[in-house]
Image: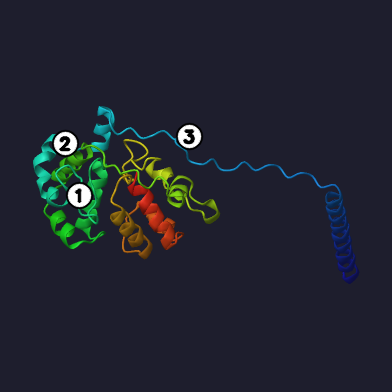
Amino acid sequence: MFHLKTKIAASLALAFLVTSSATFAASKAKQANPQPAPAVPAAPAVTTASTPVADYTSAAALKLRGGKGDAVAGADKAALCQGCHGEEGISTEPLIPKLAGQYGNYIAKQVRNYQAGIRTHQIMGAVAASVTEDELADIGAFFANKPMMKGSGSSANNQLGKDLFMNGDMSRMLVACAQCHGVTGKGKTPENSAFPVLGGQHKDYLLGQLINFRLGDRSNSPGGVMNIMVQRLNDTELEALADYISGL
């Protein structure tokens, strides 16, 4: 038995040496005659040419963006919100978000999150508690049908913010903002309210929310994606992003 085991071990060792020698020889041959590595195609950048601009003006798009509510019925009900967010959904206080053109279902979701304590704010918590589900749907539709919020375009030369928004940084697994929010920041499609309208929003509000996501004070994005993404950005990059997006 001992001799049998010895022979088996010797055979295995010999096989290993032969294999190793062959591998080493092949490796040396490759080094002597290096073959060009196959080209790896670069990930395509998000551009206005490759990504369609979201429709937010046609009647069909507005109906989808409004959600299940009635925009006409929401006109009176929205008075509850207009003192802070503006009659047309354009707030003047930079820490209060604009609602004009925002997805109706997105507005409704945020209010529900305040109702449930997922998001916290002294005033919004109290207001949210007083709104019924039907009222909420109509209010969301009302603001969704208002002329879309827009920026001044003054941040067009903000190259850092633009690069991050349009292309991200895959070396850090940082997905481009435009992949979810669209190249104009107005959303990607009329029916997808999971990712809100950002383009033209107040810079101070945007920056504040990005910081809240990074700190974990806000955590209600789909799958927590915003909390993940902003952890990969430094303060300068957050500032640049907020500035660029506000100008769209």
Q: Nearer the viewer, residue 19 or 217?
A: 217
Name the spot of residue 72 as percent of width and height, x first. Answer: 13, 35
Name the residue that disc number 1 marks: 91
Residue at 53% x, 51% y: name it.
Answer: 170
Could you tell me residue 97's position as x and y percent?
24, 51
Is 84 situated above or below 179? below
Residue 109 in percent (x, y) is at 25, 49
Q: Secondary structure at mark 3?
A: loop
Q: In which quarter of the view is residue 48 placed?
A: top left
* Residue bearing the label numbered 3: 50
Sequence-earlier tag: 3 or 1: 3
Which quadrant of the rendered structure holds the N terminus?
bottom right
Which three-letter amino acid code belongs to the residue tagged 2? Ala
Mark 3, residues whose alpha carbon is within 10 Å: few (<14), some, or many (≥20)? few
Frontmost of labels 1 and 2 is: 1
- Residue 201 in view (yes/no): yes
Q: Are marks 3 and 1 in contact (CB under 8 Å)?
A: no
Q: Is residue 229 above or below residue 9?
A: above
Residue 175 appears at what percent x and percent y? 47, 49
- Quarter of image, res 234: bottom left
| Label 1: which secondary element | loop
Mark 2–mark 3 CB contact (< 8 Å): no
**Callout 1, which amino acid?**
Ser
Residue linked to disc 2: 71
